[in-house]
Amino acid sequence: MMTASYCKISILRLCRVHPKCLRGCSASAVAFSPVHAHYCTSCVVPVVDRDTYSQAFGNSSFSLKSYSSNTRVPLSYVNSQLPKKIHVGIKRETLTTVKIRNQYSIFRLCRPVLLTNQCPTSLHHNQGSTRKISNMAADGIKLSWNVKKEQIEKDTDVLMERVKTVYDSVGAVKDDQVTFDNVVKAAADCDCWYAVERNNIDFFQHVSPSKELRDASVAADKKLSEFDVELSMRQDVFDSFVAVEKLPDFKSWKPESRRFVERVIKIGKRNGLHLPTEIQEQIKGIKKRMSDLSIDFSTNLNEESTTIEFKEEELVGLPEDFVKSLEKGSDGKLKVTLKYPHYFPCMKKARNPETRKIMETAFNSRCMKENTRILEDLVRLRDEKAKLLGYPTHAHYILEMRMAKKPEIVAEFLSSLKDKLQALKKEELDLFRQYKKEECEKYGFPDDGQINNWDLRYFMNMAEEKKYAVDQQKLKEYFPMTVVTKGLLKIYQDLLGLVFTQIKTTDVWHEDVTLYSVKDKKTEEIIGYFYLDLHPREGKYGHAACFGLQPGCLSADGSRQVSVAAMVANFTKPTAEQPSLLTHDEVETYFHEFGHVMHQICAKTDYALFSGTNVERDFVEAPSQMLENWVWEREPLLRMSSHYKDESAIPDDLLEKLTLSRQANAGVFNLRQITLGTFDQRIHTRSEANTAAVYSETCSDILGIPATKGTNMAATFGHLGGGYDAQYYGYMWSEVFCMDMFASKFKKEGVMNPEVGDLYRRCILQPGGSLDADEMLRNFLGREPQQEAFLASKGLKA
C-alpha cells in the first residue's frame, strides 16, 4: 500500500484530454457519480468539462472530501483561471502548479487511491506491494531496486493474487453484458501494471550482484511463468473477448483498441482455446514445461564462470594493456574468463593457435551437458505443441505472426543470399589460408592447410589490418567509453529531438549503473527513462541487450505511464592505468542496443501489448540495425571519439580506412549469420534434433568450416533458449529494411538531419506494435521496401 503521507494528497490537474473516452472507445456519454466527478461510461475515468460542470453544480464548490482531502476548490475560481496556469490547493505546503495545454476546458481528477469502488478491476499499480512509490528513483518510475529476497517472494504471491482477481472479474462477465470497460479496459489496465511489477521481480536474475537475489528472482520467474501459462489458458476470459468482438459498435472503435481485441483472440486461438478441453490441458502442460526449461537455459549461461589459466608466453600477440589487466593465479599463470571482454580479444589477437583452440573449445562447450538436453527437449516440446494446434512444425506456428509468414519463404531468402555470397567467401578463405601459411612458417606453428573455427576471427582481424590497414588496437585508443557515451547520447538527442538528463540516485541494482530521464525537446514532456549497465561482473547477463522494464502506455486513470528501459552490456572496465576503451565492434554494439532503448522510450501506444519493441520479431532488429550506420559515417564518428591521452581526433587516413573496411570479410561474416538462421530453421522444422550434429552439418554445408569436435555451440545459443526460436533469420531479414531506410532517407538527406530523424521517430518508433511493420515502412519510405541497398551493403548486386 502507499504511504499515509502520499494518500493525503489529492491533485486536481488540467490536462490535454478530449471529453470522449481516453482509450478511444466509441462511448462519449458521462454518468454522474456520488463523488462529484463525471466518468466516461466505458472507461470509468474521471473527466469533467466546464459545461457539464456548470450544469451539474452551478457555482457551488467542488468537494474533494471523498479523496482524502478537506480542501474545496470553487468552480468559479477554476473557470476564471482557464486557460491559464492555476494553483490547486490541497494544503498550503503542497500547492501544485498545472498548465493548461490547449483550448479544451477539461480537467481530470487524479486520485492516489484505489479505483475499487467504481471499477473493481482497475487496481492501483502498487496495491499489496511492499514497495513505496515515494521511494522510487524519479517521478513516473514505478520500479525499485532496493529490495530483499523475502520481498521478492512476498511480492510474487501478492502480484499473482491481484492479477487473478482481475481475470476472475473479466471472465465472470456474461456475454450479453460485456463492454469496453469491464473486459477490454480491465485487461489492458492489468497488463500495464502487471508488466512493471513482473519485470521488477525477474530482472534481478540478469543483473543483481547478489546470488541470493538472482536465485530468488529465478524462482519467482518460474512461479510467475507457470502462472502466466494459467492466465493464457483462461477459457472464460477468451470467451469474454470473443463476445466483445461481436458488439454492434466494435467496428467503430479506435483502430488500436480493435487491434488489441483481435490480437488477444488470435493469441487465445494459438493457445488452443478453441479446441477441446483435453487438448488444452496437454498444451498447458507443455507450455509450463517449456517455460521452466527456457529459464534454466538462460540461468545456466548467466551463472557460467569458467576460468582458464595461461602462461604469459601463450598469450603473445595480445595487447600489453590486456595482459596486464589479467588476474594472476597462485602459480603465476594468468586467468582468462569466457566473458566477452576476454574471449574476443583472445580469438582476434592470440598468435598461438593452441591458445585460440583452447578458448574456442571451452567457449562453445559452456553448459554443454545441461543445455544440450534442455534445447533438445524444447525442440521436441515445441513441435508437439505445434502439432496439437494443427501446424506442421514449430516454425510454421511461429512464422504465422511474422512478416515472413512461412518457413518456405525464410528458406528461400537464406538460400538465395547464401548462393550470392559464395564467391566472396571463397576469395576470403583463400586469403585466410595464405595468411595462415605465412604465419605458421614465420613462427613455427604446424599448418593443417585449413581454416578452423579457432582461426576464423584471428584471420578476419588480420585481413582488416593488412588489406584495409585498419589498426584495431590503435583505433581503440580513440574510443574511451566516457567519450563514446557522451557522443552517442548527443547524437540520439539531436537526431530524434530529445533531451537526456542524468539523474543521481542510489535506487539502482549496482553502483556501476546510471539513470537518465528522456524529455521531448519541443514539449519538454518526460517520455521515459533509461538505465545504463555497461560492465561485466559475476552472474550478470553475458551478452548485450535492451530490457524493457516499464511499458509506455495508458494507465488505469487515463494518464500516460512513461516507458523505462535498461541497456545491459559487458564492456571492459577501466583500470588505474587507462579508461575503458571500446573496440569499433563494441561501439557498433553500443549503438545497436541503444537503438532498442530508443524504440522502447519513443513508442507511444495506448496498450502495453503494443508498447516499445513489441513488433514482429523479424522486424524488431531493423530500427537498431539502421542506427548502426552512424558508426561508419565520418560526422558521427568524430562526435563520439577522441584519443584518451590528448583528446585528439581520429586521423583522417585512419577514418577513411575504417569506413572502407565495412565490407571486409562480408562473405564469411554474413554466411555465419545465415548458418545460424538456417540451423534454427532446421531444428524447428522437425520433431526432434541432435543439435550438435545438425549444427556441425549446417556449418559444413554453408560456411565450409565444420564445428569443433566435442563442442556444441547450440548449447550456448541463448536466442534459441527462448524468444528467438525459429526467428534468428530475422537479423538478416531486418537488414533489408534497415539498409533501405538508411540509404533512401538519411544517406540522401543527411545522417544528422533532424527532419528525417523526426519522420523516423514518428513513423517507425512511435507506433510500437500498433501498426504492422510493412505499413510503418511504407509510411516512412513512401513506397514498398526494396532490397538493392541491402545487397549493396554486402558487396553484391541485385
Image (cartoon, grey):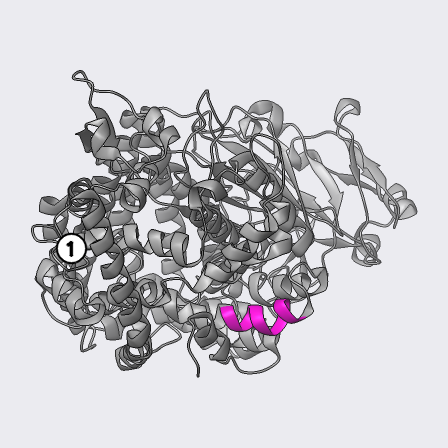
| Residue in the picture at 62% in, 48% down | 638
* Closest to the observer, 610 or 181: 610
The single residue placed furthest to the front in the displayed view is: 442
* Closest to the observer, 151 or 208: 208
Image side of residue 533 versus residue 207, left or right: right
Quadrant showing the C terminus: bottom left
Height in image: 409 above or below 108? below
Height in image: 235 above or below 792? above
Q: Which structural element holds mark 1?
A: helix
Is residue 131 located in the magenta-colored stretch of the structure?
A: no
Whether residue 176 is visible, yes or no, is no
| Residue in the picture at 36% in, 30% down | 320
* Closest to the observer, 622 or 70: 622
Height in image: 132 above or below 226? above
Height in image: 78 above or below 632? above
- Measured from the top left, where is residue 475 in percent x and y? 49, 44
Whether residue 731 is visible, yes or no, is yes
- Measured from the top left, where is residue 203 in percent x and y? 37, 39
Image side of residue 576 versus residue 328, left or right: right
- Measured from the top left, where is residue 321 in percent x and y? 39, 29
Image side of residue 795 versus residue 690, left or right: right
* Closest to the observer, 567 or 26: 567
Q: Please tell me how many numbered marks the rendered image carries.
A: 1
- The residue that label 1 is drawn on is 375
The single residue placed furthest to the right in the displayed view is: 80
- Decide whether the magenta segment is chiefly helix, strand or loop: helix
| Residue in the picture at 30% in, 70% down | 427
- Measured from the top left, where is residue 581 in percent x and y? 47, 36
Residue type highlighted by circle 1: Leu
Is residue 747 located in the magenta-colored stretch of the structure?
A: yes
Q: Which residues are magenta?
A: 739-748
